[in-house]
Amino acid sequence: MKPIKINNVQNLLEQFCEKQVYVHLETTNGAYASHFDDNAYNVGAYIRNAKVSFSQAKIVGNGKTYRAGLKMEHGWIYAEGLSDFELDEKNRLLMAGHDREGRLMVSLEISETPFSN
């Protein structure tokens, strides 16, 4: 993966607009991150192969981390804290954000074909 360049990723996101696509969205501070504070609790969200269509896609950010949003007919999907991306050999847009130690904290992936399990 390489650091997000906002114009490049915006163009890639727009290539998926108005298509039936599969989305993988994951957030975590638990499975990949350890807490040494008894008062802390782990949170996370995971959805894979949600079949959606979106009419608008937007990425915004401050040059370090970014938020990508997908506007669907009845709402939005968004991920915040993204920092890296790649378009892989299967034409899947993979975006992720990592903590200071390189552990995954958030990912948003879009594909025209289902992701493997």
Image (cartoon, rainbow, N blue to C red):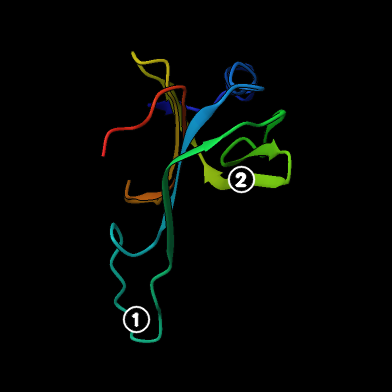
Q: Position of residue 7 (x, y in %)?
A: 65, 19
Disc 2 element: strand
Mark 2 residue type: Tyr
User: For the C terminus, which image quadrant?
Assistant: top left
Instruction: Compute the Cα span from label 1 to label 2.
Output: 29 Å
Figure quadrant of residue 42: bottom left
- The earlier-in-sequence mark between 1 and 2 is 1
- The residue at 40%/77% (across/down) is 41
Disc on res. 48: none
Q: Secondary structure at mark 1?
A: loop
Q: Which mark is residue 78?
A: 2
User: What label does residue 37 carry, if any?
Assistant: 1
In the image, taking residue 37 as reference, residue 77 lies left or right, namely right
Residue at (35, 16) in percent of width and height: 90
The percent position of residue 107, horizontal first and vertical second, equals 44, 43
| Residue occupying the far bottom of the picture | 39
- Residue at 44% x, 39% y is 96
Q: Residues within 10 Å of mark 2 (few under 14, many from 20)?
A: some
Query: Three-letter amino acid code at disc 1?
Result: Asp
The N terminus appears in which quarter of the rendering?
Answer: top left
